[in-house]
Amino acid sequence: MGLSGSSGRLHVTIDVGRVRADTPGCEHVVHFNNAGSSLPPRQVTDAVVDHLRLEERVGGYEAAAAALDRSERTYDALAELVGADRDEIALVENATRAWDMAFYSLPWKPGDRILTSRAEYASNAIAFLQTARRHDVRVEVVPDDESGALSVEALRDMIDERVKLIAVTHVPTQGGLVNPAAEIGAVAREAGVTFLLDACQSIGQSRVDVREIGCDLLSATGRKFLRGPRGTGFLYCSRRMLDRLEPPFLDLHAATWTSADSYEVRGDARRFENWEGYVAGKIGLGVAADYALSLGLDAIEERVTGLAGALRGRLAAIPGVTVHDRGARRCGIVTFTVDGHDSRDVAARLSAAKVNVSVSAAYSARWDFEARALPSLVRSSVHYYNTEDELDRLCEALPSA
Ligand SMILES: Cc1ncc(COP(=O)(O)O)c(C=O)c1O
């Protein structure tokens, strides 16, 4: 970490040499699949492996008891990361399960309306459609503004007393767009409507503060920009919403069996968890959150958006390459196509050159792909440990149009 300054304002910057030294994967690949799963820092891997070794030596339950401080730290670290309190955090397997536990807790009645974004992730859209079928609720996609983000004005116009939920993806899986979460939160608060934010792709690459945004519920995953272990995720549920939401599944961790025919749901967000869990992963997730906090979220965002902007510039200058990212505010996800080449072939060619990217296709965000008549896209997602030289390596390995 270092300090740099202009016009008297000092800010922390990322020490790229240090974060690369912490990231063994940097020696082996050029990794631009951070929106899929980042290269973890060795601190995260060590924490996971150390706990698995402890389980091997003393037994799983005994290891969990011995490491209780470490697994409990994860709640504090994640609470700090999103500006919440620790009892508003639930640790679950992934972002989808976090989102589902929140969404399927809502008490639906016929005629309720769900307002959502066009960029929505497939799993969320499928859950909307299932709920629409089951409960006769309406799913309505808020139009985009001219930049390609959800139009806050259109959202405001669509509000009425039947709107039960605003559910929006902060950063979509298929592009560099950042939806205006705080402006959406302001509309939701004004209307008294529950706001569920899918922050799966924004957590770890930018500052995401639940109080500033004003969301009631937020879902996120461990393995993407947060650089945590696979199989980890978390849900933020505001204290205000806790008593109003009974999870779709309960077990003896989420609730207490109080008499032969009664039970009591926990008072904190752990009502959305289940008893058995991946303790090593939970510990690793906390280490990943602490790692991000130690670098500083503003410094992370500045570096990630800087590198992504540089990549878009380089790609746009290559004949036959089209960059597809939209939105007035953009993030570390860069999507593009190369004329005359299927994106899967482009990704395979990059992979052969030891450059990891992924491909985004219609199945992951059908509303957006169809509205924009998009083919499959090469998704190149940068992180703060990437370098300008790596951007060049990607561009040089592209097939010519
Ligand atoms: C926007 C968005 N939401 C949710 C998810 C699901 O995350 P997970 O695979 O951790 O359940 C993804 C995964 O790519 C995503 O991009």
Image (cartoon, rainbow, N blue to C red):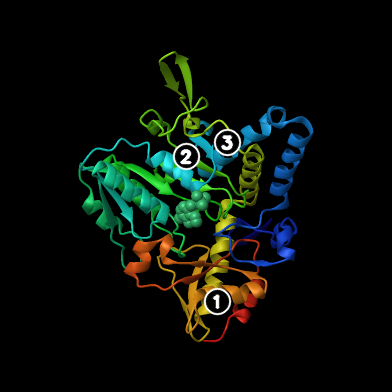
Q: Amino acid at mark 2?
A: Tyr
**85 with respect to 285 (left or right):** left
Pinpoint residue 81: horizontal percent, then vertical percent. 55, 44
Pinpoint residue 122: horizontal percent, then vertical percent. 41, 56
Q: Secondary structure at mark 1?
A: helix
Precedes in sequence: disc 3 or disc 1: 3
Q: Secondary structure at mark 2?
A: strand
Q: Quadrant of residue 60?
A: top right
Q: Secondary structure at mark 3?
A: helix
Viewport quadrant of the N terminus: bottom right
Mark nearest the camera among 3 and 1 is 1
Q: Give above or below for 70 relative to 349.
A: above
Q: Is residue 137 visible?
A: yes
- At 79% from the left edge and 34% from the top edge, which residue is drawn? 57
Q: Which residue is mark 3?
A: 75
State yes or no: Cβ of the residue under disc 1 lies below 8 Å from any atom of ligand 1: no
- At 56% from the left edge and 41% from the top edge, which residue is drawn? 78
Q: Give above or below for 293 relative to 118.
A: above
- At 54% from the left edge and 59% from the top edge, which residue is drawn? 35
Precedes in sequence: disc 2 or disc 1: 2
Q: Are marks 3 and 2 in contact (CB under 8 Å)?
A: no
Q: In front: 138, or 67?
A: 138
Circle 1 crowding by C-alpha within 10 Å: few under 14, some 14–19, many from 20: few
Q: What's the mark number on residue 301?
A: none
Q: Which residue is mark 2?
A: 236
Q: Which residue is mark 1?
A: 345
